[in-house]
Amino acid sequence: MNLARLLVAIAVLILVVGGYIASQFAVWSGTTAQYAQRIDTEPVKMLALVLFVGIVALTIARKAEAPE
């Protein structure tokens, strides 16, 4: 379970850093509106939903593993 949490954390970190770099590049190149349109799509929303559900599932699994 620790490996799964680590992999999810690494994936989230890569996505956050990548998104930040992409947004800064869009600002510097003057294509902010186009960048906003590109990230406001169904695949990006679905990825966010999958990550959210995965993080919630890992949290619930952790609490079920080690009750207080």
Image (spheres, rainbow, N blue to C red):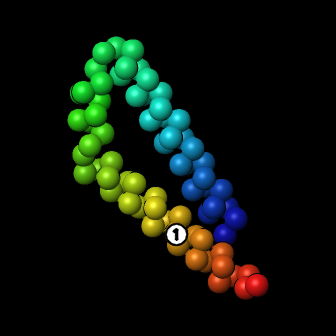
Secondary element under disc 1, as helix, strand or loop, is: helix
46 left or right of 59? left
Which residue is drawn at the image coordinates 54% and 49% (left, top)?
A: 11
The quarter in which the C terminus is drawn is bottom right
Residue 13: give x, y in percent of width and height. 57, 44
Which residue is drawn at the image coordinates 49% and 42% (left, top)?
A: 15
Look at the picture and state if 26 lies above or below 4.
Answer: above
32 left or right of 68? left
- Name the residue beneath numbered marker 1: 56
Which residue is drawn at the image coordinates 42% and 28% (left, top)?
A: 22
Q: Quadrant of residue 27?
A: top left
Residue 43: give x, y in percent of width and height. 29, 50
> Tag count in the figure?
1
The quarter in which the N terminus is drawn is bottom right
Q: Amino acid at mark 1?
A: Val
Residue 36: give x, y in percent of width and height. 28, 34
Residue 16: give x, y in percent of width and height. 50, 41
Look at the picture and state if 66 lies above or below 18.
Answer: below
Q: Neighbour class for label 1 at 10 Å: few (<14), some, many (≥20)?
A: few
Look at the picture and state if 46 lies above or below 2.
Answer: above
Farthest top residue in view: 29
Farthest right residue in view: 68
Which residue is drawn at the image coordinates 30% and 15% (left, top)?
A: 30
17 left or right of 33? right
